[in-house]
């Protein structure tokens, strides 16, 4: 019996699909027999503000909220928003970051450089994997698959007690069959990037099987 | 797609539901007949889900004009012998309060459950009031689920208790319960066999003073029966068998307690009493529990409601023990594991294992470094165009003004570049406070209000403005839906009438207000002149003027054009004409307009083709894509 809790924080900008991503991962974990909780701030989520989803899985009961420094994985759908959730990171956290900045809709603001963002994250954790999800989505001619690329990237680091197929199936259940092919392409691209990155970071064995599935 | 299947899933199925969706499913399993409410975060999804499936399960589920009328829909259903569920956010209960308090005096016939969602941390609200006080005020029981499964299960218990005691029951959630997904094992959906039948009983249902006097006594009798029932049916859960600390908790606070006890490995030290009903409390159960432990910690989100009542139970039962609560647990904002880890560590005399100040400092530094990202008007939002025109008109005329704001997407006018907003209180208060200011001040007053808010609570305020001849400009920003909570229908939409709704301008004109103009929100250039004219009218004639700025919510526009197979024609920037003056990015701030290499550009995927930016560009550099 393990009392460990897997904690994932997903951040992005309203409209990027943060909530959908969280739901897809949550459903897959539920099917595997875990207690799962996912929570986010709605209401203003569609209006271009910051959106954060907390997702936790385990065999015991737990708060839906991820405690400071507790995230095993951070999925950032946008660079500024990835740094904004730094309080949940610890030196072992794996950060999957979409290498893209969406400018906040405010006049006369200063946008930090990507290098500045990355170095501030690296101050807390060196395990940062950059994914050009926007570039991949643009090549596939559908900006709506940005979050699918990041889902593939999550599958590629293999920290979840889920196979890539199980994650992909959970995605397919959530979307219209018409969009299965393009999403699978996007998923595979993300998967490849993080799988390569994880071996170069030498993380393969450190982070697997944080929690064991229930019988 | 997934949602509908899951909400209507068969018994035994394991689904991943939002707390609010689970409440809706619970209502179906409890064979609810009638559901009504007014949208408000974090309560909205309960009724939204029920409306979505209402046809297939044969229930009547409708959005009402406001929470008070929704509540009265519930009373009507209950008096007809039907099971009624009414939904609202915490501040919505203020609107419904008049009928709510009195409904306990008549008691209910069919089971009556009021879902009230408190917004701890005020993620989308103007205050953080604790609904449990309303339970105490009205002698109406309050049941509090702590996760999605309980959301579903407690609805059934609430209906059951309501019918056994003839009292309405509040099912109170807080944000983290309503807006968390969790694993829910479904029960069976029961179809109602009830037929609406109103049995006349004027000596009970007419709250004339003489009848209210008798009913007051009957209410207290019902309430005593309720106390006994909660005690007898043991509507609680006990965990652990430690005796050092007895933790009394409920609702959203509970899973935080469990996580902290796990992490600190305290199961041998603590015992937990989880309450189902947080008002009234099961006094004997609580007294026995307290007697079995060394000290007591009461953990609840927001105000010390359980705590104060537990302390009074201890006095009644002559128990002297060390009791902690709000001395260790904050009485503001939502609880997180951190609060419990700190409180329990202190109480047990351990060092707090985590240096939370490190995370606070990290967060502080990063927030200083990052540009803020407040919610913004969507690309193609009609409000931006309306407010731009107003800002232009006011600055051309050099008019000093007070801007009385109201509640809706347009509240975001406070953010740059508009900076509109001097006061903001509650639904309808934009006109209410505005018309009050206008008769007292020499300054020009603009009162903003949305369409759904207009019907909800602004009409009486506008009548007062007309009756007092208050010199103010009322700006009704009519985007055709209750936009902020997710584009729900309202009386202006005509959804329930199968066509034309109730036009705002007809209501305004009927009040005798002479200056009433309807404008197209996206006709920015003309609108500047119309606003100037209206401002002049108010200043010179010292009378109210109303401008209704009409333009469909951009998100609804996208939905509608998809349904109709209409293709949105985006605009683009002519790179030769664009001088990089930044009027579009700094004074209009549409998310679809970006800036790079000293030129503006338009993201064709975000642009909804509203055409407003083309009108404000001083160099006519923005044109429709050919």
Image (tube, coloured by chain):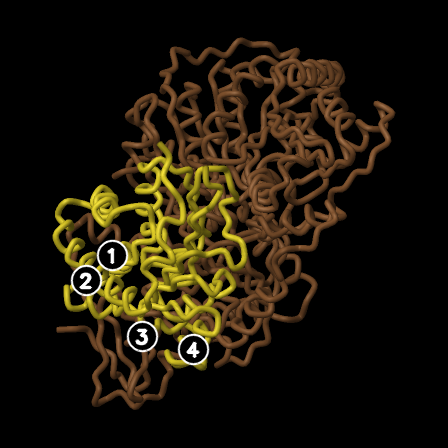
Location of residue B415 with respect to B150 vertically, above or below: below
Characterize the local packing of mark 3: few (<14), some (14-19) or many (20 or more) Cα atoms within 10 angstroms.
many
- Position of B3 with respect to A185 (left or right) is right
Characterize the local packing of mark 1: few (<14), some (14-19) or many (20 or more) Cα atoms within 10 angstroms.
many
> Where does label 2 land, which residue?
A189
Instruction: State the image coordinates of residue B615 (x, y, percent, origin top left).
Output: 30, 76
Whether residue B416 is visible here, answered yes or no, is yes
Same chain shared by disc 4 and disc 2: yes
> Where does label 4 land, which residue?
A119
Circle 3 chain = B
| Whole-number angstrom distance, CA of label 3 to CA of label 1 | 30 Å
- Position of B256 with respect to B487 (left or right) is right
The first of marks 2 and 1 along the sequence is 1
Q: Which chain is yellow?
A: A
> Where does label 1 land, which residue?
A152
Whether residue B610 is visible here, answered yes or no, is no
- In the structure shown, which secondary structural element does the residue marked by tag 1 occupy? helix
Instruction: State the image coordinates of residue B233 (x, y, percent, origin top left).
Output: 61, 15
Task: Name the tint of chain B in the rendering.
Answer: brown
| Whole-number angstrom distance, CA of label 2 to CA of label 1 | 7 Å
Q: Residue at x 62, y 36 (%)?
A: B267
Q: Looking at this view, is B294 or B432 the one in front?
A: B294
- In the structure shown, which secondary structural element does the residue marked by tag 2 occupy? helix
The first of marks 4 and 2 along the sequence is 4
> Where does label 3 land, which residue?
B593
| Whole-number angstrom distance, CA of label 3 to CA of label 2 | 29 Å
Give the position of the C terminus of chain B as an image quadrant. bottom left
Count of marks placed on residues? 4
Q: Residue at x 30, y 64 (%)?
A: A198
């Amino acid at each position: 019996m393990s009392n460990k809790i897997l904690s994932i924080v997903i951040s992005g900008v309203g409209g990027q699909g943060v909530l959908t991503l969280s739901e897809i991962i949550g459903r897959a974990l539920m099917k595997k027999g875990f207690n799962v909780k996912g929570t986010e701030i709605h209401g203003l989520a569609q209006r271009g503000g910051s959106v954060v989803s907390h997702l936790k899985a385990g065999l015991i009961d737990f708060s839906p909220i991820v405690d400071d420094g507790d995230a095993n994985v951070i999925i950032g759908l946008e660079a500024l928003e990835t740094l904004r959730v730094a309080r949940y990171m610890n030196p072992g956290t794996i950060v999957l970051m979409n290498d893209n900045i969406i400018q906040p809709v405010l006049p006369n603001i200063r946008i930090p450089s990507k290098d500045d963002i990355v170095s501030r994250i690296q101050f807390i954790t060196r395990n940062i994997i950059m994914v050009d999800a926007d570039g991949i989505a643009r090549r596939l001619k559908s900006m709506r698959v940005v979050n699918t690329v990041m889902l593939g990237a999550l599958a590629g680091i293999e920290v979840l007690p889920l196979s890539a197929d199980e994650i992909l199936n959970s995605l397919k259940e959530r979307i219209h069959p018409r969009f299965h092919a393009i999403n699978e392409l996007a998923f595979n691209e993300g998967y490849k990037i993080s799988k390569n990155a994880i071996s170069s970071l030498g993380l393969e064995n450190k982070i697997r099987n944080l929690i064991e599935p229930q019988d | 797609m997934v949602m509908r299947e899951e909400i209507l899933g068969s018994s035994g199925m394991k689904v991943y539901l939002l707390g609010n969706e689970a409440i809706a499913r619970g209502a179906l399993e409890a064979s609810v007949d009638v559901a009504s409410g007014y949208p408000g975060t974090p309560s909205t999804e309960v009724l939204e889900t029920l409306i979505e499936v209402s046809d297939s399960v044969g229930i009547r589920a409708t959005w009402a004009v406001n929470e008070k009328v929704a509540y009265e829909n519930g009373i009507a259903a209950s008096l007809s012998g039907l099971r009624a569920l009414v939904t609202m956010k915490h501040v919505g209960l203020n609107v419904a309060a008049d009928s709510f308090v009195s409904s306990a005096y008549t008691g209910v016939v069919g089971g009556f459950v009021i879902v009230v969602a408190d917004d701890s941390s005020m993620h989308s609200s103007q205050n953080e009031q604790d609904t449990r006080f309303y339970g105490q005020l009205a002698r109406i029981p309050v049941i509090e689920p702590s996760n999605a499964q309980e959301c579903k299960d407690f609805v059934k218990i609430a209906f059951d208790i309501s019918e056994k005691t003839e009292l309405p029951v509040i099912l109170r959630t807080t944000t983290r319960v309503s807006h968390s997904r969790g694993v829910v094992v479904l029960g069976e959906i029961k179809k109602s066999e009830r037929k609406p039948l109103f049995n006349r009983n004027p000596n009970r249902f007419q709250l004339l003073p003489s009848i209210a006097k008798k009913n007051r006594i009957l209410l207290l009798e019902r309430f005593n029966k309720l106390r006994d029932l909660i005690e007898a049916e043991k509507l609680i859960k006990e965990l652990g068998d430690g005796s050092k600390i007895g933790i009394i908790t409920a609702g959203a606070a509970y899973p935080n307690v469990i996580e902290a006890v796990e992490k600190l490995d305290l199961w041998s030290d603590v015992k937990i009493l989880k309450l189902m009903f947080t008002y009234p409390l099961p006094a004997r159960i609580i007294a026995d529990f307290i007697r079995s432990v060394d000290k007591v910690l009461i953990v609840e989100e927001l105000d010390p409601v359980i705590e104060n009542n537990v302390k009074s139970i201890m006095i009644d039962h002559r128990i002297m023990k060390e009791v902690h609560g709000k001395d260790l647990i904050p009485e503001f904002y939502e609880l997180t594991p951190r609060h419990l880890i700190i409180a329990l560590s202190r109480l047990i005399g351990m060092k707090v294992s985590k240096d939370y100040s490190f995370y606070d400092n990290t967060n502080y530094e990063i927030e200083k470094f990052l540009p803020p990202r407040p919610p913004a008007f969507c690309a193609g939002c009609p409000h931006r165009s309306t407010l731009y025109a107003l800002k232009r008109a006011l600055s051309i005329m050099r008019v000093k003004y007070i801007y009385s704001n109201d509640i809706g997407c347009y509240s975001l006018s406070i953010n740059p570049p508009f900076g509109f907003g001097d006061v903001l209180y509650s639904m309808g208060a934009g006109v209410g406070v505005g018309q009050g200011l206008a008769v007292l001040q020499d300054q020009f007053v603009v009162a903003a209000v949305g369409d759904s808010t207009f019907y909800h609570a602004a009409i009486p305020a506008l009548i007062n403005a007309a009756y007092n001849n208050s010199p103010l400009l009322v700006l009704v920003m009519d985007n055709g839906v209750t936009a902020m909570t997710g584009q729900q229908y309202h009386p202006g939409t005509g959804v329930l009438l199968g066509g034309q709704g109730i036009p705002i301008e007809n209501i305004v004109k009927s009040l005798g207000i002479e200056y009433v103009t309807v404008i197209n929100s996206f006709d920015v250039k003309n609108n500047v002149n119309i606003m100037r004219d209206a401002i002049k009218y108010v200043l010179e004639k010292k009378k109210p003027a109303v401008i209704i700025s009409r333009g469909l919510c951009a998100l609804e526009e996208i939905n509608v054009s998809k349904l109709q197979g209409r293709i949105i024609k985006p605009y683009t920037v002519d790179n030769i004409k664009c001088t990089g003056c930044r009027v579009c990015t700094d004074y209009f701030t549409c998310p679809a307009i970006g800036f790079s290499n000293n030129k503006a550009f338009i993201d064709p995927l975000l642009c909804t083709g509203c055409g407003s930016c083309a009108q404000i560009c001083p160099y006519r550099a923005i044109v429709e894509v050919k």
